[in-house]
């Protein structure tokens, strides 16, 4: 499955590391996944569920919360509320670059965060919690012997999953002030609660509280036999299967063509992935591709360069225009191949150019036409090549209007 890594700006201004697992084919829907407390986006459960959902046509974004994994910032300065705000920012990023998430999924404390964020993501139609606490303050049970010291001293180091984390009084105050059940009652979105009855980290009573507080439509699926972190590979696959089947009732998962107006051009969005010095993710309609620079100039050569894309546009337009003419005139053209190269030349070496000084851009275009054509037909097709819209754009006056995004 295609896997993209990039960064986006979180609520605190930090760059948050993200991963987007996308289907090999058309995207049926986008999902946003929130990982468990102190885990990170690459924890096995999150990764396996995201990959499995991609296999069902659901593109899933997961990211490291502030101070975790590859994200910037200090974990000690994060709170439950800041995590919720970062989830909203992640949804904003999807909305701006691809499409807003229709499905929200949260594991453990990430499930509580997803419930709190859901009301601020209007396009979301389906919400899924996996082993989620009904009260964010539940997380303090993991370091209950240090709570009083943290309140007295303002902060303290606790051990979670064998790793040290610095917790501040602000975190304790923030989780204590949450009223998650009120937000669940006001959810007004389809809810799927998934929980193991033998979960000894977050008890099954938490699932009961969430389910009872929620309005219909709501569903509960028992994850009997699983542990809190869904350590078994088959457990994550089962969770993804259930989510995919359940979401079909509330989210339109039928892949449909782009709804953008056929009469006008589609937007092209180019954004840094931050996975390399120059790597970009290029999105237009349902299509996504990488752009980069060759290794020789500091890139990783993970995709075509800017001039490669320019030549691609001209080459594709040339071939398409010639094909349209050949079909309309019923010419026996089997195949058209266009080979292009960009270079710089001295202006003085171009006899037909108006510019006489300095350097000029030159595009060499070689066209191979296969088929039983006579000389006149081949000559006419070569003339048609110069009439392709991109050729005309490149050889006419072009106005580029640049403005800052609001």
Image (cartoon, rainbow, N blue to C red):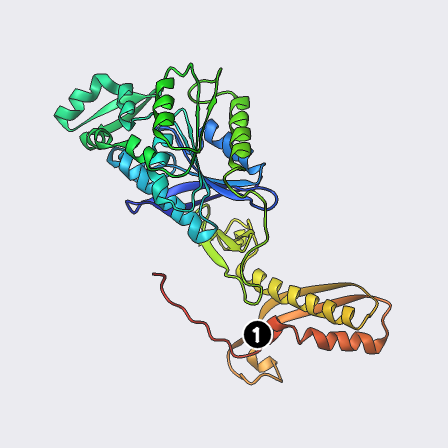
| Residue 290 percent across, percent down from the top left | 54, 51
314 in relation to 206, above or below: below
The furthest residue to the front: 216
Whole-percent x, y for residue 317 in the image: 65, 67
Q: Percent from the top left, x then y, of residue 349?
A: 60, 80
| Image-quadrant location for residue 192 | top left
Across the whole image, how many numbered discs are drawn on residues? 1
Q: In the rendering, at what x and y percent does residue 43 appear? A: 44, 29
SS for callout 1: helix
Q: Is residue 47 visible to the viewer in this orientation of the structure?
A: yes
| Figure quadrant of the N terminus | top right
* Viewer-side residue, 193 vs 136: 193
In the displayed structure, does residue 277 sit left or right of residue 356? left
Q: Label 1, on which residue?
A: 393
Residue drawn at (36%, 46%), measured in percent from left and top?
89
Residue furthest toward the left?
Answer: 152
Give the answer, above or below, for where 26 lies relative to 353.
above
Residue in the image at 53% along x and 40% along y = 58
Kindly identify the residue that appears in the image at 63 percent across and 65 percent down. 341
Q: Quadrant of the C terminus?
A: bottom left
Disc 1 crowd rating (10 Å Cα; few below 14, some 14-19, many 20+) is few
Q: Is residue 214 left or right of residue 325?
A: left
- Determine the image quadrant of residue 356: bottom right
The one of 233 and 199 positioned closer to us in this rendering: 199
Does 163 sit above or below residue 272?
A: above
- Observer able to see residue 74: no
């Amino acid at each position: 499955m295609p896997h993209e890594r990039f960064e986006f700006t979180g609520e605190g201004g930090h760059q948050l590391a993200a991963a987007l697992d996308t289907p090999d084919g058309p995207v049926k829907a986008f999902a946003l996944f929130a990982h468990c407390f102190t885990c990170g986006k690459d924890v096995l459960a999150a990764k396996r569920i995201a990959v499995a959902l991609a296999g069902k046509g659901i593109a899933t974004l997961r990211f490291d919360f502030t101070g975790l994994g590859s994200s910037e910032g200090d974990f000690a300065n994060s709170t439950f509320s800041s995590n919720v705000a970062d989830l909203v920012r992640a949804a904003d990023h999807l909305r701006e670059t691809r499409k807003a998430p229709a499905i929200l999924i949260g594991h453990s404390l990430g499930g509580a965060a997803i419930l709190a964020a859901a009301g601020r993501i209007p396009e979301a139609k389906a919400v899924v919690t996996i082993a989620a606490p009904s009260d964010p303050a539940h997380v303090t049970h993991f370091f209950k012997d240090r709570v009083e010291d943290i309140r007295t001293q303002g902060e303290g180091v606790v051990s979670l999953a064998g790793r040290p984390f610095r917790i501040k009084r602000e975190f304790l105050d923030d989780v204590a002030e949450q009223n998650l059940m009120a937000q669940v009652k006001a959810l007004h979105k389809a809810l799927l609660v998934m929980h193991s009855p033998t979960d000894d980290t977050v008890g099954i009573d938490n699932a009961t509280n969430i389910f009872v507080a929620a309005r219909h439509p709501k569903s509960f699926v028992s994850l009997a036999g699983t542990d809190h972190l869904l350590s078994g590979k088959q457990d994550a696959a089962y969770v993804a299967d259930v989510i995919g089947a359940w979401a079909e009732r509330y989210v339109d998962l039928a892949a449909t063509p782009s709804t953008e107006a056929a009469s006008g051009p589609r937007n092209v969005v180019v954004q840094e992935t931050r996975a390399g010095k120059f790597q970009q993710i290029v999105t237009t309609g349902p299509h996504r591709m990488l752009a980069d620079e060759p290794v020789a100039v500091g890139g990783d050569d993970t995709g075509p360069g800017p001039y490669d894309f320019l030549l691609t546009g001209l080459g594709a337009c040339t071939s398409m225009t010639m094909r349209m003419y050949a079909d309309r005139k019923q010419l026996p053209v089997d195949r058209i191949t266009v080979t292009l190269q960009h270079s710089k030349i001295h202006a003085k070496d171009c006899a037909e150019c108006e510019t006489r000084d300095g350097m000029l851009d030159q595009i060499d275009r070689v066209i191979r036409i296969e088929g039983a054509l006579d000389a006149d037909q081949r000559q006419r097709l070569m003339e048609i090549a110069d009439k392709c819209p991109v050729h005309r754009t490149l050889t006419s006056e072009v106005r580029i209007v640049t403005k800052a995004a609001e």
